[in-house]
Image (spheres, grey):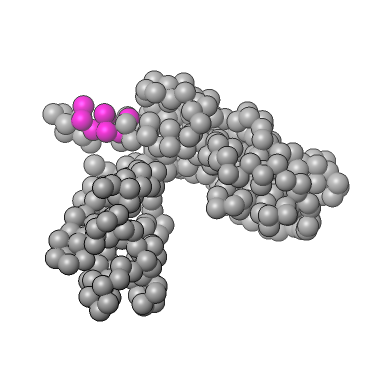
Amino acid sequence: MKKLTLSLLVAVALLGLVENTDVVKADAPSGDALHEKADGLRKALLSGTSDELFNKLAPWLRGRCDLFKERLPDLLEEELADAPADERGQWETELHNNIIERITDRDPAGKLGVKTFEDVLKLSAANMYAADVGQLRLQADEELKPNRDAKWHEVDRAIFTAEEKLKWAPKGALATRTFGTIAFVNRFNDTMEVTCVGDGNAWQVISFKAQIGTRNVKSDGTELVKDPIFKIVDKELRAAKRSEGKQLLGAARDHLRVQWARDGSVPKKISDSTELEYFDGVYFKLRDTVYKKPDADRGAVVAEPIDDEELGWGVLYFDYGSGESDHNWYDTEKELDQALKAFQTAK
């Protein structure tokens, strides 16, 4: 099955939304107004609703999300166009289940109430955006509540001009625009940076990025409601890439068995006896932790995707003595964590 691409860039380009080919200049609104706009985005991301976050974005970015939602049925139909007649039903079911799984994974608290594919189609553009950008995951993480509720301080501010090529102008017009960036930090050393562009006498949010605890939330403003929610990885390509992960896992198993054979102790980390980077590949890297089954000389090592989570997480369960091994793959980190927990507590 071919890879699904839902690029708003192509769709909007075809509309020819920008006609002006002159260089455009804008005067900068005040720095205090920049702070107010950026701080509003910060509050909406950390504690607001999907609509509150969505409405903080520049109008043209909200328009791209609305366009995506309107075109979604057609884009999905395009994906199924090449399906053999006798396999179309299977392709469609796989596609719909993939989308449902991805959205529910991004909505751990179940705020969106997605159970069926019809529920997906009923989602507002704001809710699609909140799931895609990571707002719902961030707010559902109870361990990060102190981080979200902490006092945030503005630690940097910059207002500057830059020239850029207009992405949707037929003749590639240039614009000189005024940008403003505010950086916030809290006592946990979490960071958030919000970037706005001058629009007449106002600021409009075009991008933001935040590192809060272990969570990285960002929106680059160029392709909102991005492909990952709706993407299916070609099975043959995924299998080829996973073969690298299997090789890394096998090499780690062999190395750990040698360490075990020396003194009979079960290794706790790969890095205790070698450089972890030795096991880094192009698509996968090995997690440092060596997992252990209670009351048994049986271990497990994990291969994590480096960039593309579509590839999944690989685990090799093995006996230190015989070397007997079993490979398992998990599509989500949540599934991986559940499997490892069961492995470490099984009797």
Residue 95 included in the magenta stretch of the image: yes
* 347 relative position to 51: left or right: left
> Residue drawn 71% across and 39% down?
43
Residue 235 visible in the picture: yes
Residue 104 included in the magenta stretch of the image: no
Q: Can you tell which quarter of the image residue 16 is in? A: top right
Is 28 above or below relative to 52? below
* 190 relative position to 138: left or right: right
* 251 relative position to 198: left or right: left
Along the viewing direction, whichever of 129 and 248 lies nearer the viewer? 248
- Residue 276, x across and y down, in percent: 39, 72
The mark total stands at: 0
The magenta stretch spans which residues?
89-96
Q: Can you tell which quarter of the image residue 1 is in? A: top left
- Residue 192, x across and y down, in percent: 67, 51
Along the viewing direction, whichever of 133 and 23 lies nearer the viewer? 133
